[in-house]
Amino acid sequence: MTENLKWQITSDSLDASQLLVDETLFHVANGYIGVRGNFEEGYPNHYNTIRGAYINGVYDISEVKHGEKLHGFIDSKQKIINITDVQGIKLYIAGEKFSLFDGKVLNFKRILDMREGIYKRQILWESPKGHIIEINIQRMASFIKPELFVIDYTVRSINYEGEIVFVSTQKGDVFNYFDPTDPRVAGELEKHLTVETIDIQKDIGIITSITNKSHIRVTSAVKHVVSSQHELERIQDDKSSTTKIRLYIKAGQAQRLVKYCIFTDSVRFSDCHQAAIDKMEEVLETPIEQLYQLQKVYLSAFWDKADVVVNGDDRLQQGIHFSLFELLQSVGKDQYSNIAAKGLSGEGYEGHYFWDTEIYMLPFFLLTDKALAENLLNYRYEKLEAARENARILGHKKGALYPWRTISGSECSAYFPSGTAQYHINADIAYMFVQYYFVTGDLDFVESKGAEVLFETARLWMDTGHYVEDSFRIDAVTGPDEYTCIVNNNYYTNCMAKYNLKWAVKFYELLKENNRIEHLAQKLGITEEEVNEWQQAAEKMYLPYDEKLDINPQDDSFLSKAIWDFENTPKDQYPLLLHYHPLYIYRYQVCKQADTVLAHFLLEDEQKLSTIKKSYEYYEKITTHDSSLSTCIFSIVAAKLGEIRKAYDYFMQTTRLDLDNIHHNTKDGIHTANMGGTYMGMVYGFAGLRIKESGIFFNPVIPEQWKSYEFKICYQGRMIKIHVNQEQSHYTLLEGKELKIHVYDQEYILNDDIIIKI
Amino acid sequence: MTENLKWQITSDSLDASQLLVDETLFHVANGYIGVRGNFEEGYPNHYNTIRGAYINGVYDISEVKHGEKLHGFIDSKQKIINITDVQGIKLYIAGEKFSLFDGKVLNFKRILDMREGIYKRQILWESPKGHIIEINIQRMASFIKPELFVIDYTVRSINYEGEIVFVSTQKGDVFNYFDPTDPRVAGELEKHLTVETIDIQKDIGIITSITNKSHIRVTSAVKHVVSSQHELERIQDDKSSTTKIRLYIKAGQAQRLVKYCIFTDSVRFSDCHQAAIDKMEEVLETPIEQLYQLQKVYLSAFWDKADVVVNGDDRLQQGIHFSLFELLQSVGKDQYSNIAAKGLSGEGYEGHYFWDTEIYMLPFFLLTDKALAENLLNYRYEKLEAARENARILGHKKGALYPWRTISGSECSAYFPSGTAQYHINADIAYMFVQYYFVTGDLDFVESKGAEVLFETARLWMDTGHYVEDSFRIDAVTGPDEYTCIVNNNYYTNCMAKYNLKWAVKFYELLKENNRIEHLAQKLGITEEEVNEWQQAAEKMYLPYDEKLDINPQDDSFLSKAIWDFENTPKDQYPLLLHYHPLYIYRYQVCKQADTVLAHFLLEDEQKLSTIKKSYEYYEKITTHDSSLSTCIFSIVAAKLGEIRKAYDYFMQTTRLDLDNIHHNTKDGIHTANMGGTYMGMVYGFAGLRIKESGIFFNPVIPEQWKSYEFKICYQGRMIKIHVNQEQSHYTLLEGKELKIHVYDQEYILNDDIIIKI
């Protein structure tokens, strides 16, 4: 693998099932729009394809039916929608239609270049009649102009002279994906978007559609720019518009069509139709090559801050780059959007935002791009009122309960035992508000947003838990492990709730000390007495501990269950949730993912190291990692425990999950949380970073397989570079004032740089 | 209340909401067919009505959708269907249509006579034009000819002379009930039955329909017999047939139309169309008055065996009669049917059979009509194969798991935490097979059916439970209390499973002693080793016990939860399940119904009386009785504990539940289990009857409000009468050889009769 290939994802597969995966891997996105990597010219009829484009935060409402609908069960949910299809460009050479499934494919390669932010398709093709052409297509979702998606299509003739025709389409008649071979979705083709207007203004084809139930408008505007003299013909019906472009080509000559596509929506723009025209005109003012250059500059700055370099394993390096790049492609960059579980690469999990954002993805942004991190937290603050309403639905008289999965703020989970019951999402969000405060020291943000979120989530814990004698307990919730549902005193939940309560108190005191509490206390009706109750509940929080095993039981009843019969479970029965009734799974000690082990990472000071070690060993034996959120956490805790080989193995299972389609469902979209997990595995795992109230801590280790690794982080106005090789770790203060750091629990003042033996 | 009224239910209400309730209360049924008490002439358009007729065991398949469908969730369920509507008879007097909502109602009364087995409607009506007529309509679902439902319609003119016209309809175009004002069911009008053929043979109008998905045929045959000379005209379309009958009437004269309706189905008859004609011809051979007489004779025999007499409270007596009569109306009398939760009186619970049959209703039949009890157990035996399949769906490699709710044998519960997870249904069924053996001593039945059911259910417990050190534990099931779901070691479940395992062993040994085990052991592959495992698990069964409180906790975690805030729960928030999210309810100590207390009744020897007393007192405080299966059990245990006043209060809440529409949903059908509970309250509660391996036991008490009570039971070939008054209890052997009985734990030989002071 050359240096270049560490920065590129490539494929030359025309295999039907890999094409579905490649549609995901080669999608382009910028956090606002995402377009799957479908072939412009289409596929043979019998090929299944998930042709899609999405806007972050643009959704329709889907009805939810329940076999038995109990009180508070959701009636409807949000669902990301497939928007206007602008991907279509057919090419005709003397009447022969270009297709990779006809004629001879002399060369075919697709490349995602992560430094350029461009996805390319390179083809050398001989038509059935013997005409040979070279095709280069590149796509970009611009980070600079977020509304812009562009297809840049170049044809070079090798041996043909004559007419070529581009037939470019803009289709408003789109559906969300469904699989007609799957009986569970057959006949459930969901039509969410209806074309309202279709017209041409200033040579720009414009379609404005509206979602059926959420009444959100989406406009697509398309402008074709052609390299040389041509004839242009438009055909339009009430749902789509087709542009035919006729050109003359000579052998050795190239022709080029640039299809500019602008997407706007009524969530962001009061008149999205006009906004699309305006944005298009604005974009056209800049030459395309300059837009590519700006993309590269943007990414260069990104990689400069965010790159994690590993020397000694190029495939791993490729996996890391892909993970970080996908995080950037996926993250919402305005207050209307967050990060969907599949980013903007597919319709899996319906475009919903989960706790994945806070616990798995926010750390990356927090350490590399404060503004993006702040935006993600702003989103949660904006949804606080919806979380209050959700708490009322769940029976709580006070506080706010963030929904398990959502786009616009209301609960979208239709199976509450492994959805809504995961109350820990409240504490997960609170945890990241606190981490944000640690990293930025931004008291204004605490005052304006963070404190309110912590106070309202703290209130929810008070209304959920209760005292048994002298201990505060939380019953009937579900922890991160979805193979064990609705339990009492889930260790993770109680631990995190304790932290939530503790920091609600600390934020209160912090603001009080600074004379900044009055307004908020008044607004929320918070009294000192209430704050004392939080303090007391945090102190008295019950954390299950088993003396005999010296571990933290996952919940009150976990250890009394039988251990799953792993020995007699065939490999093809994983993931278990696809092969066993949940009731059967609930009966056993078996974990889908890190639960107690995750608590041992996030709140490591709650337990002795020996207990963490025993817990880790105990849960390792019974965890299937059927969730993509699991191996990264085991890797981090293994690294902490000095189990470098284990940490390495878990990490390697994490980093290429989508590139190697390990979970067999990458066709439905990337696993964004796992990509965040890849970052965390490096930074929190191998480098042992922890950010606490008491400062910044490193505990670097390095697997024997690597020569060295290196990354930068931003912390309290500084930028620090960390380099670790087999002999030493090296800390360099790149920006900002000197600061105290801790390495292997030893305190140092980092001024210029420090080198410490490993 | 006169003597007569103890045997009659009456109403004169024309109030819209009470009419819906009266449709249920005045339904007529015989265990095969049931017809709701709708007015033949109909209602004003704006009246809501649930017009229905049902055949026990005749169902269609309904699709079940889930918001999130996990492995093993049901795709479809059975649903009782509304069959051909034969209730319509309109009456015209000189062109004026008779209606209780027009003209003047001079007299109106409906009467259900429980000794005659007839429902009557008596009307004196003056038409808007001043014609006065008297109408007497009576309906019967014949116990002698189960396919027969008859409407016997007599008009007497007071002051009118001229033509009267009956317009009688038979409508094949029927739907299951839906409520257009309820958004959850709007637009979900379910059409299950499609007319196949409609014709007239031998003056009989016949409609044969077929269910859409289960492909069950239903035939209705209607024959009109008119009192005097008339003109008859038929109008027929492809879905219904109408018969117009013109008669001449004079003042003082009466005219009578008898509408014979026969229902047959393809579950019971290979050619139900022909069977309906045959049955009709057979019925017509017997004069109608004789059919009425036979009905009375049948009921006379029933009451002779089954009546429970209470002197001193006529309203109570009426409630008891209604309960027993409804049990008789509801009980399936062939192998294809059981007892639906709403009998044949409505569509509530979709006509499903639950554990209600075994634990609440079978005792009545077992003690009064062995054949009916045997039939109910036969039904379960017939469904054993389906129960094996259900166990596989739930992940079990061996054994059988009876579905929580079903008609044809497969699971119909769409919310498994309070449905399928109620594994105790297995032990409930086993328990009644054992009770049946105690009462009948029928070893043939044990050999042919009972043992197989007990062996297969025992196997399921072995596959569900596991050992923790020296105790056998059962995790992740739900007990009878549906406000606490998916728990470990539910006391009721473990207790009942223990009994199930113990009696599987005993049945094995019993058959072995009699050299009757070989065939069955071979068929099922049962070894002595396996039987020993059952024995051991029964002995080692873990039964939660709290030493401090001296009670049996409902499950492992029950006592550690907070107690529901009853004080601050407004009355209109009950039943809780309609006002709180299940997750909220699960978080608290609050019971929908008797759970541990039920175990203390069914298996009273498992605990010391003091523990039972403490348990009863504990659970009493936290039980809402939101289920209709609860107060009867609390009454029985209160009686056992000598809390006669409490027993009386709970009993009085039980006996008139439907007559007084206490649960506000009698319109959807009667609560059959509660009616069984009424019987049990008397016999097991006040009389303190218990039937055990060691014999028959009485512990009679009597509330101060009553003079006396009396009933008969059949036991091991004897019939015994029990009479209890304020001074003494009196046992009379009416049939059979002398036997040993126990009264207040004292042993007696009952030969002729025994009187014992109270």
Image (spheres, coloured by chain):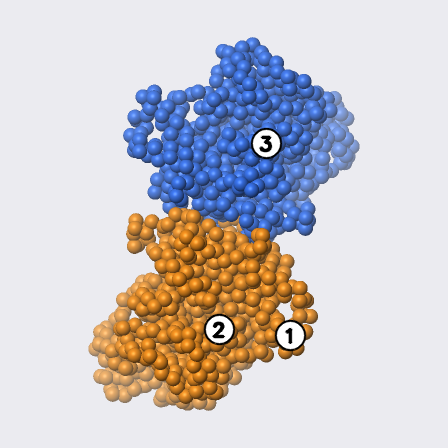
Chain colours: A blue, B orange
Residues A97 and B136: in front is B136
**Residue B692 marker:** 2
Label 2 marks which chain's residue?
Answer: B
Q: How many marks?
A: 3
Left or right of B674 on screen, residue A304:
right
**Residue B273 marker:** none
Q: Quadrant of residue A223?
A: top right
Mark 1, residue position:
B512
How many residues crowd mark 2 within 10 Å: few (<14), some (14–19), many (20+)?
some
Q: Quadrant of residue A685?
A: top right
Q: Which residue type carries mark 3? A: Val
Residue occupying the point 35% across, 80% down: B756
Name the image quarter holding the C terminus of chain A.
Answer: top right
The answer to whether residue A136 is above or below residue B198 is above
Q: Which residue type carries mark 1? A: Lys
Q: Secondary structure at mark 1?
A: helix
Q: Position of residue B455 (x, y in %)?
A: 60, 67
The answer to whether residue B156 is above or below residue A665 is below
Do dots 2 and 3 share one subunit? Answer: no
Q: Which residue type carries mark 2? A: Lys
Residues A684 and A203: in front is A684
Label 1 or label 2, whichever comes before in sequence order: 1
**Residue A637 marker:** 3
Name the image quarter holding the N terminus of chain A.
Answer: top right
